[in-house]
Image (cartoon, coloured by chain):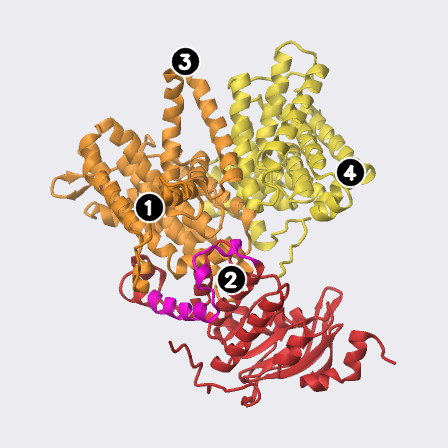
Amino acid sequence: MIYREAGQFKTSYAADQAIFPIRQDRIGVALILLVAFFGVPFAANDYFLSTIFLPFLVFSLAALGLNILTGYCGQLSLGTGGFMATGAFAAYKFATAFPDMHIVFVLICAGLATAGVGMLFGLPSLRIKGFYLAVATLAAQFFLIWLFVKVPWFTNYSPSGVISAPPMKLWGDVWVTGTGATAATRYLFCLSVVAVLAMLAKNMVRSSIGREWMAIRDMDIAAEIIGIRPLRTKLIAFGVSSFYCGIAGALWAFCYTGSVEPGAFEISRSFQILFMVIIGGLGSIVGCFLGAAFIILLPIFLSNAPALVGLSISVATVSHMEAMVFGALIIFFLVVEPHGLARLWQIAKEKLRLWPFPH
Amino acid sequence: MTGMLYELTIGPFVAMAEFPLFFIEVLVGGLLSGVMYSLVALGFVLIFKASGVFNFAQGAMVLFAALFFAGFMDMGMPVLVALVLTIGVMVLLAYSIERVVLRPLVNQPHIILFMATIGITFFIDGLGQQIWGSGIRSIEIGLPKQPINFGEVQINAFDIISAFAAGLLVAGLALFFQYTRIGRALRAVADDHQAALSVGIPLQTIWVIVWTVAGIVALVAGIIWGSKLGVQFSLAMVALKALPVLILGGFTSIPGAIIGGLIIGAGEKLGEVYWGTALGGGIEEWFAYMLALGFLLFRPQGLFGEKIIERV
Amino acid sequence: MDTTVHAQGAPAAQTAHGKRIGDTLLKVENISLSFGGVRALTNISFEIRKHEILAIIGPNGAGKSSMLNVINGFYHPQEGRITYKGETRKRMRPHRAAAQGIARTFQNIALFKGMSTLDNVMTGRLLKMKQPFWMQALYWGPAQREETVHREFCERIIDFLEIQHIRKTPVGRLPYGLQKRVELARALAAEPELLLLDEPMAGMNVEEKEDMCRFILDVNEEFGTTIALIEHDMGVVMDISDRVVVLDYGRKLADGTPDEVRTNPDVIAAYLGESH
C-alpha cells in the first residue's frame, strides 16, 4: 500500500517520461538527497566520511561508467582500472600544467582525455565482440598501467615516483583536495559531481542513445538493419563510459586517497568494479549504487560479524573469506537474479504495492 | 630521438644477427616457456570445445591443483599418492562446478557463463588459500634443474623435460578425442548440444568429464609451473596470459593453443630482451595482449579457429 | 481520433479493388546469390510497384528469406542489380536501406528482448531522431521535445495495432503472437515506404491471423505503404495480395496476379507434384 501507484494519472507524455514518474519515487529520492547533502556531513564523523562514504561515491561513479558500457551496451570491459588511472593522471597533468584551472575544468578535461583513450581502445569493437573484446580491454588495462609506471613524464619526473594530488579549491577558502580539505568538503564535492553525472546518465539511458546501446546489446544484427550504426553507437558508449571512469579515477586520486598511484588501478580494481555492476544489476543506474554499497560494506561485515557471534578469525582468513564470498555471490546472483540487486529492489517495490494486504 | 628510433626498429635485428647463438638461446627459452602457456590454454580449449563456456577459472584451477599437490607432498606423501589424491580433488571440483554453476545456467548467454567462471575463480582462489595458506610452496619431484650445453647454447634441462611432458599430454589428448567413444561424444557435444542430447549423449556427465580432464591438464600445468616458479598466487594471474594465446590460436583448436602459446612465449622473451631496454623494461606485462589485439583486428578467428557467420 | 498519417502525400485508398497501384518502387534484376557452394538464388528478376501488396511464396528452402535479405542489404548478391526509387546499385547497405524507407520484420523475431514494447517501437524512430547524445543527457528543451513528439507517433502505432496493454512489458516475456505484432509496430514506426514482412503469420491461430491480415491491409490502405510479404498460408495470399511471385529452388517460377499464379502449371507441379 505504501507503493500504490493507483490514482497517479499522467495527462501528458512528458509527465510519463519524467525521470521519476511515480510520486513515491520522487519523495524517496528527494529524501535520500536531503540526507546525503545535509544529514551525513553533520552526523558522520571524519573517519566514516573518508573510509566509507567517499569511496562509495567514487566506486558508484566508476560503476556507472562500466554499467553504461557493459550493462547497457553489452560490451564487456576489463579495462576499467586502466581508464580510471588515465583519468587520475590526466587530472594530475592538467592541474600541474595549468595551476590556475578550476578543479571542475580539470575534471572535465581529465574525463575528455580518458574518453579519447577509451574510444581508441574501443575501435576494435567494430570487429570483435564478447570475450574477444574483453581480451582487448585487458590489453588496454595492462598497457596503460605499464605506461603510467614507466614513463616519467606522467609523474612530472618525480624522483620518488609517489605523487600527491595538488591542493585545489572550489572558491575562496573552500579546499576540496590537498591537506587543507576537510573530509566533509571533499565528500560534498564528490557527492555533487556524482549526483550530476548520475542524472545525466539516467537521462541518456532513457533517450535514443540509451535505446541504441540496448539494441546493440540485445541483437546487434537487427540493430544494424533498422539503421543503427554499430561503430558510432559503440564508440559513444566507450567514450561516455571512459569519461565517467576517468572522472572517478581523478576523484579517487584527488579527493579520496590524495595521491596519484598506478597501483590503485590494477586489474583487481577492474574486477572489483565489474562485480559491483553484476551484483548491483547490469543495465540499471540504481544498481550501480547498490552494488558499490554492497562491495564496500561486505568486507566490513565479514571482519566484524564473527566477533558478534563470538568467533575470532584471523585477518588472513577474512581476506580469503572475502574472495570466497565474492565468488559465491557472483554465481548466486547470476543464477538466481541476473539483474542483480536492482531487480530485487524492484520486486520489493512491487510487493510494497500491496503490503500489508496479501492480495 | 633518432637513437630511440634506431633502437626500436633496426637495432634489435642487428643485435640478433651479431650474436646468433644468444638469439637462439633466447628463442628456445621463450618457446619453452611458451609451452607452459600452451598447457593452460589447452584446458580452456577443452572446455570451450565441449560446452562453449569460456572458463576464466582455468588459471585458478592451475593454482588450485598445484596447491593441493604441493600440500599433499608437504604432508609427507609420496609423489604418486599425492598425484592420485589431487586428481580426486579435481574430479570433485569438476562435479561441484557442473552441479552448482553449469546446470542452473545452462541456457544463459555465454557472457553470463563467462562471468560465472570469474566468480568460480575468486571462490577457488579463496578456498585454496584458506586450506593451504598463502605462503609460497615449492614442488620437488626430482626433475633436474641445471642447464645443459648444446655446443655453445645453454638450455635448461627442466624446460626440455616439461616440453616433452606437455607434448605427451597433447598427443594423449589428441588420441583420446579421435579414437575413444567418450572422445567422440565430446566432439559431438562441442558441435551441437541439442543434437548430442537427442542422440542420447548425457550432457551433464560429459561436462563433468570435460572439466575433470581440464582439471588434470591444469594439474600438469600446475606441477610444471609450480616446480619452476614456486606455487603462489601470482600463478593465477599469469594464467590470464593464456587468453592472448587463445586469441592467436583460435578458441577451438588444440594445435592452435600449442602454436599460439609458443608464439606468445617466444615473442614475449624476444620482445623483452631486444626491445625491452629501449622501452624501459617490463614489456612482458602487455606484449601478449597487444599482440592478441593486433590479431583480433586482422584475423579475429585466430590462426586456426573457425570463422563465425552470423545469420538472421 | 484521427490516426491517419499520410506518408509522403500518398492518397488514402478506399478498397483493395479501387486501389491505385503506382509505378515501380523496387526492381531486382538477375539476382544470383550463393553461400560457399550453395546456390540460394539464381537469376531472379521481378518488380514491386508502389502501393501494392506482393506475396512471395514457394516451398521451404526456395530462397524467399534470402531474397528479402538481399533487398534490405543484409546479404550481398554475387550478380544482379537492385533499383530502388530510381537508384540502381549492385548491393544495398542495411543502413542505407533503412534510411531510404525500407523496413522489415523477421522470421525468427528480431526484437530487443531486454527492452519494453514501447522502447522497441521507439527504436524504429531512431533514424528520425536527430538530437546528439549530449543534448539527450541534459534532457532539456529540444531533446525533451523530440522525445515527446516521437513518443506520440509511436503511441498512435501502438493504438493502431492494439498493443497498449503491453507497452511497458519487456518483450522477452510476451507470447509469440504479440511479439510478432510488436515487431510490426517497430517496422511501422520507421514510416517505411516499402515494408518487408517475413512470414508475419507463422505460428498464429486463425484469430490472430485474421487480426494480422486486417492490420496489413489497414497499413496498406491508410498509409499507402508498399508491402512485400513471405507467406505460406495460401488463403491469406490469395485474399490480400495484388500480385504473387513464386520461387522454387532459388529460381522464379511465376509472377502475376493470384489467379494467374494459381492456374500456372509449373506452380502446380512444384507444389503438388506432377498433376495428371
- Residue at mark 3: A312
Let me know if marks 1 and 3 both belong to one chain.
yes
Amino acid type for the residue under numbered disc 4: Gly
Q: Is residue A63 visible?
A: no
The mark total stands at 4
Sequence-wise, which precedes: disc 2 or disc 3?
Answer: 2
The residue range painted magenta reads: C147-175
Let me know if marks 2 and 1 both belong to one chain.
yes
Say which of C57 and B94 sits in front: C57
Overall secondary structure of the magenta stretch? Answer: helix
- Residue at mark 2: A223
Q: Residue at x 71, y 15 (%)?
A: B81
Q: On the rendered image, what quadrant is the C terminus of chain C found in?
A: bottom right
Q: Are marks 2 and 1 in contact (CB under 8 Å)?
A: no
How far apart are labels 4 and 1 at the CA level?
A: 57 Å
Name the tint of chain A in the rendering: orange
User: Helix, strand or loop at disc 1?
Assistant: loop
- Residue at mark 4: B183
**The residue marked by circle 3 belongs to what chain?**
A
Q: Is residue A324 above or below residue A316?
A: below
User: Helix, strand or loop at disc 2?
Assistant: helix
Q: Which residue appears farthest toward the right when viewing the image?
A: C276
- Residue at mark 1: A3
